[in-house]
Amino acid sequence: MSTWIAGLPEQARAVLDPVHYDYYAGGVGDEVVLGENEAAFRRLALLPRVLRGRSERDLSVELPGGRLDLPVLIAPTAFHRLAHPDGELATARAAAAAGTVLVSGVAATVAIGEVVAAARSAAADASVWFQLYPQPDEDVTACLVERAERAGCAALVVTADSPVFGRHRRDAEHGFHDLPAGLAAENMRDLPGAPPGGVRDIEMSPSVSWAHLDRLRELTSLPVWLKGVLHPADAVLAVEHGMAGIVVSNHGGRQSDLAPAAVEALPAVVDAVAGRVPVVLDGGVRSGGDVAVALALGAAAVGVGRPVLWGLAAAGEPGVARVLDVLRDEFDHVLALCGGRDPADLTRDLVVARGTGVFARCG
Ligand SMILES: Cc1cc2nc3c(=O)[nH]c(=O)nc-3n(C[C@H](O)[C@H](O)[C@H](O)COP(=O)(O)O)c2cc1C
Ligand SMILES: CCCCC(=O)C(=O)O
């Protein structure tokens, strides 16, 4: 792990309300998956290739919804104003200035229109994506999609791994169920079924299905990504249902504590998708080396969640900027060490499982 990023949780802990720190840091159940997401990266190694590099490397990747100057985007995480008063405005500006995408969540504490405006104030051509949970009341879903389109979002990310909300022991122990006074999920204001000015609850429902997704797709011409896929059969269904991309994710260890580490689920999904749509990986990415391993296993890019929250809490916009800068610098360095010229040079034959000899290839 990057030394600086490794020290960030402690920096954030020093400034955050302990209840909010635990909300960000925690996982579901015994937090097995939370630990495994990071540990699984430590079990993988990259075989360098020699004598094929170049002095200037191109780190950019092209995805449905925008071009990224580095293969790292900001995964959707809720309630950035718990971390810093500037909240999602700071995150959006830092992402845009770094030439990457913020996936701003439906559970943001700043409305999506203001988030996009903040990103564009930092870079006129910035892309912001909008994450949502398909709501059982489809009028609410339609309204959210329209808000994201009107705001100028370049893609939608539908999170599918939350038919019910994960049971977070740390939050239960603290009795943390509501945002403090003055903060709200601003995208949920004034929706069908809410009183004027009121904020609707974000509903998770086990009855949300592929049919909901089909209807959602008909509402929009934006590319739609499906987030929270771990089973290869679901990846195939996602392609068949017209998804523009897939995010392999166990929600940062916050949903099922029986899920595999995200990076261990990645190769089978990449194989099932067979290049038809790009696959993004999130969960446990803490260094440029982790980014390189995920790309070598077939990810087109990675998402980072908690490190961005820690950077935001510790130092606001410059803190998020530094997280992205460290990841870019480390990734570029690892790419050079592997004889890579651009992300496409990171191929699966480079990945080996540690401790089992170089012939025990992963995936
Ligand atoms: C505090 C917190 C809030 C999150 N909120 C959301 C959310 O609203 N929607 C969503 O799709 N994922 C959410 N996630 C999951 C992230 O998008 C991502 O999958 C995860 O954080 C990646 O793991 P990492 O934190 O190890 O980088 C949240 C994660 C955290 C830590
Ligand atoms: C309704 C807010 C959902 C936030 C979330 O997804 C998480 O805390 O993991």
Image (cartoon, helix red, strand yellow):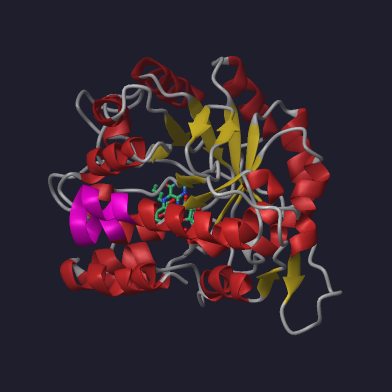
The magenta segment is: 311-322
Instruction: Provide residue 285's location: percent of width, then percent of height.
Output: 51, 61
Please say if 195 is above or below 258.
above
Tell me which secondary structure the magenta stretch mostly adopts: helix
Magenta-drawn stretch contains 198: no
The answer to which image quadrant residue 64 occupies is top right
Is residue 47 rendered to the left or right of residue 170? right
On the question of residue 84 being in view, the answer is yes
Residue 177 in view: no
Comparing 289 with 269, the one in front is 289
Left or right: 124 as drawn, with respect to 45: left
Front residue of this view, candidates 189 and 51: 51
Percent position of residue 348, x then y:
77, 57
- Residue at image x 23%, y 42%? 90
Q: Residue at x 58, y 57 (%)?
A: 336
Q: Is residue 260 above or below residue 182?
A: below
Query: Relative to residue 266, is residue 8 depicted above or below?
Result: below
